[in-house]
Image: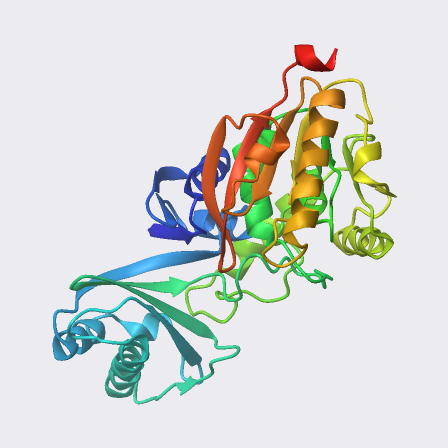
Amino acid sequence: MRFAATCGTGLEPALAAELTALGLSGVEAGHRVVRFQGELEDGYRACLWSRVATRVLLFLRKCFAGSADAFYAELRKIPWYEHLGKDSTLAVTFVGTNEAIIHTGFGAQKTKDAVVDSLRDDRGNRPGVDLQAPDVRIHVALQGTRALVSIDLSGDPLHLRGFDRDGGDAPLKETLAAGILWHSGYAEAEGPLVDPMCGSGTFLVEAAGMRAGAAPGRHRPRWGFSRWRGHDEGMWQRLLEEAADRERPLPPDVIFGGDHNQAQRRRAEYNLRRAGFGDQVTVVKRELRDWRPPVESPGFVVSNPPYGERMGSPKEVTATWRELGDVLRRHFLGWDAWLLAGQAPLAKKLGLRPRKRIAVFNGPLEGRLLHVPIADKPPARLQ
């Protein structure tokens, strides 16, 4: 079987590293997608364990889509009765356009018509459409005159971890937070992690899940494959049992977070409790200028400081980034900082030189992930 795990721009290397670490084969990164090969169990494993992927798709067929009629005819060649039953419902996600299929709504309609007509002719049943909670979601990605047709094994996007989360005013998407942690090297390292401006605690929750060996999908109640005809429930239950056996208590004193805002601190604590880590991660109310390393051994400072898109005036943002840079270079010597910034040249406000700048998106907002290593000795002017 061939699979595709989708992701946000800039997260492809992180997702490829994660899927490789899961033991999946044929991992190959593209634009906003990482492909891999294997058995159905491998697709299930990616759904259950990936923190970076947005969706996991099972590839069915490549169809010619140089004309709408040709596309319809190609779709009808797929044995849809292997995927949808007599009383199944479906929905179509269609991505891309070309000269023949000029908007995604038209492409989705042609896909739905072909599937419904094929099943009616082959089996005498006509499945219904359910756009909110379909039994099977069909995914079509149009690339020029080619259409890649897949079954969406995920259902709801994978950033929904299966528990209620209070994201506050400017939430960081879980998949982006996990991707940043993979970019930083934290996912496969041993050092501590500090987020001095933790907001609703997304970095803390994702970091805790990684350290505890917790499968992010273990508590999701429903999947795109749950009512798909190809689903193997026994196989899925074995993977869930394996995930439960692998989860372990979080080691003490490895993850620390805080915020100057008491409401945000409480929000982070709430989200950690919902994720199962409420008494295992230290969260404090603390001004940025008062942060010091909580443990002796250096580790990672990973944070999403305000950068003016949703929170903070330009003057406040500039002051915050200058203060952050001052705290890092004075007190976090030898640590590795990974900071999410907007497109504005905020790195200059830090007074520290980023080693890397990686373009990423938090929803529709484009930003830059800055890798800022902190020298293990202070600059001469600060001695």
Looking at the image, which residue is at 62% across and 32% down?
A: 350
Image quadrant where residue 136 sits = bottom left
- How many numbered marks are there? 0
Q: Is residue 135 visible?
A: yes
Model colouring:
rainbow
Looking at the image, which residue is at 60% across and 38% down?
A: 339
Question: In screen coordinates, is 112 left or right of 224?
Answer: left
Q: Quadrant of the C terminus?
A: top right
Residue 261 vs residue 317, the one in the foreground: 317
Image quadrant where residue 16 sits = top left
Looking at the image, which residue is at 48% across and 75% down?
A: 135
Residue 160 vs residue 368, the one in the foreground: 368
Q: Is residue 23 visible?
A: no
Q: Position of residue 74 (x, y in %)?
A: 17, 71
Q: Position of residue 321 (x, y in %)?
A: 66, 39
Question: In screen coordinates, is 251 left or right of 60?
Answer: right
Q: Position of residue 27 (x, y in %)?
A: 37, 39
Q: Position of residue 56 (x, y in %)?
A: 44, 55
Residue 136 vs residue 176, the one in the foreground: 176
Question: In screen coordinates, is 51 left or right of 259?
Answer: left
**Does residue 357 sit above or below 98 in this rendering?**
above
**Does residue 347 sit above or below 344 in this rendering?**
above
